[in-house]
Image: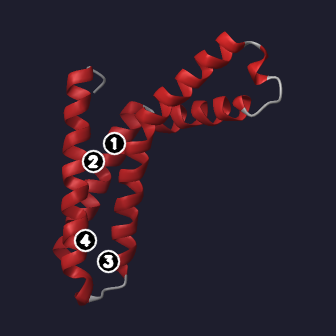
Amino acid sequence: MNELQTQTATLAAQVEEARAKLDIVSLRQQLTKLQAASTQPDFWSDSSAAQETMKQIAKLDARTAPWNQLAQSLADVRDMLALDDASLQADLQAQLSQAEATFSELKQQLKFSGQF
């Protein structure tokens, strides 16, 4: 279990570093503001501006959601590791492997988009 804890901590640190470089928190705040604006009663009074806002919402969500989901997945693994239940080891190893694969995929996508 100690090895899993070490692997999880290492991956979580790498993910947080990437999230910081990508400024995911700020992007998420922008997304929240745009989503709040889209719920206003007069939002669709200017349909072209509303459509542009909806495009921005989709773009920001697509950019931030995978990173937030990965961070949450790693937090879940850490929480389960804290239970120190050996019967969970195989499941936690599988979840960690999936998180590693997801992180590699996200990094690969960034290389192609030139954002990292």
Q: Is residue 23 left or right of residue 36?
A: left
- Residue 33 pos. (x, y %): 67, 32
What kind of element bears circle 1? Answer: helix
For the residues bearing labels 1 and 2, Cβ distance under 8 angstroms: yes
Q: Is residue 94 visible?
A: yes
- Identify the secondary structure beneath mark 2: helix
The residue singled out by tag 4 in the image is 5
Q: CA distance from mark 4 to mark 1?
A: 18 Å
Q: Residue at x 32, y 77 (%)?
A: 81
- State the separation of the CA atoms marked 1 and 3: 22 Å
Q: Is residue 1 visible?
A: no
Badge 1 or badge 3: first in the primary sequence = 1
| Residue 93 screen position, x and y as percent | 19, 71
Mark 2, residues whose alpha carbon is within 10 Å: few (<14), some, or many (≥20)?
Answer: few
What kind of residue is marked 2? Gln
Circle 1 residue: 17
Is residue 27 positioned above or below 55 on the image? Answer: below
**Which secondary structure lies at badge 4?**
helix
The residue type indicated by label 3 comes to Leu
Q: Find the distance from the CA under tag 1 to the CA under tag 2.
A: 5 Å
Q: Quadrant of residue 112?
A: top left
Pointer 4 or 1: first along the chain: 4
Mark 3 crowdedness (10 Å alpha carbons): few <14, some 14-19, many ≥20: some
Establish if 51 lies above or below 1: above
Give the number of callouts. Answer: 4
Q: Residues within 10 Å of mark 1 (few under 14, many from 20)?
A: few
Residue 81 image label: 3
Q: Dividing the image into 4 quarters, which one contains the N terminus? A: bottom left
Q: Quadrant of the C terminus?
A: top left
- Circle 2 or circle 3, nearest the eye: 3
User: Which residue has dot 2 on it?
Assistant: 14
